Image (cartoon, coloured by chain):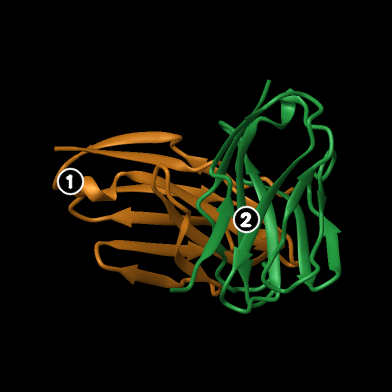
Chain colours: A green, B orange
Amino acid sequence: EAQVTQNPRYLITVTGKKLTVTCSQNMNHEYMSWYRQDPGLGLRQIYYSMNVEVTDKGDVPEGYKVSRKEKRNFPLILESPSPNQTSLYFCASSFRPTGGSDTQYFGPGTRLTVL
Amino acid sequence: ILNVEQSPQSLHVQEGDSTNFTCSFPSSNFYALHWYRWETAKSPEALFVMTLNGDEKKKGRISATLNTKEGYSYLYIKGSQPEDSATYLCALTSNDYKLSFGAGTTVTVRA
């Protein structure tokens, strides 16, 4: 089954404790991205990756890091989480960059709470 | 981030009734318009991608139209059913290949 998986689905942590949210896709997609979703706002892109070892900042990259060592995986790293990073996070992938008319496939979301 | 607006923010509709809602975007930046359906605790799921002015797409009881000259798209739900309850997201791909999402319209279908 074609899918994007994220782990964990739910996470409560404390300020400053490094964490990683994993994302994996089994569709051989080149393009992957991370979004955060906050009440009243649209999905905002954090980082994206065009291919292995190629990553770039989205609209709200501050406080986040990513890596793309393999095509299927695109982890999101919060080196020192802060309460303003409490949000719902989505990973997404597509064959081509989202700038085209290509459809994105989304993961199930990770709800992160930083105390 | 481009200003993509969806209205209304939420709506309630009686089962069996039809409804529609709007996505507005800056027409000068248009490349493609996406609609997604997002059920609580699930992943957003693609409904339509539209690229041409006047495009109309249909999937079951849900359809969408696109006006790129005036910068809007309508999503229609015909004969609403409880399973149509979800948040409907639209997203604009701009001509510099950026993707901007609206905040969504949350539809609740009352039995």
SS category of the residue bearing label 2: strand
* Residue A56 in the image, given as x and y percentages of width and height: 85, 60
Image quarter in which the C terminus of chain A is found: top right
User: Which residue shows up at 79% across the image and 37% down it?
Assistant: A18
User: Which residue shows up at 73% across the image and 26% down it?
Assistant: A84
* Residue B104 in the image, given as x and y percentages of width and height: 49, 43
User: Which chain hosts label 1?
Assistant: B
* Residue B56 in the image, given as x and y percentages of width and height: 40, 71
User: Which chain hosts label 2?
Assistant: A
Work out whether A113 lies above or below B88.
above
Can residue B96 be seen in the rendering of this structure?
no
SS category of the residue bearing label 1: loop
Work out whether A19 lies above or below B75.
above
Instruction: Give the distance between the C-alpha atoms of the residues marked 1 and 2, in whole angstroms.
Output: 35 Å
Give the residue type at disc 2.
Cys
User: Which residue shows up at 13% across the image and 47% down it?
Assistant: B16
Q: Is residue A50 left or right of residue B16?
A: right
Work out whether B37 lies above or below B17.
below
| Residue found farthest to the top | A115
Q: Please name whichever residue, B68 or B15, is drawn nearer the observer in this view of the structure.
A: B15
Image quarter in which the N terminus of chain A is found: bottom left
Crowd band around label 1 with a 10 angstrom C-alpha radius: few (<14), some (14–19), many (20+): few
Crowd band around label 2 with a 10 angstrom C-alpha radius: few (<14), some (14–19), many (20+): many
Mark closer to the observer (1, 2) = 2
> In the rendering, which numbered label is found on residue A91?
2
> In the rendering, which numbered label is found on residue B17?
1
* Residue A111 in the image, given as x and y percentages of width and height: 57, 37
Q: Please name whichever residue, B69 or A18, is drawn nearer the observer in this view of the structure.
A: A18
Give the residue type at disc 1.
Asp
Q: Is residue B99 left or right of residue A47?
A: left
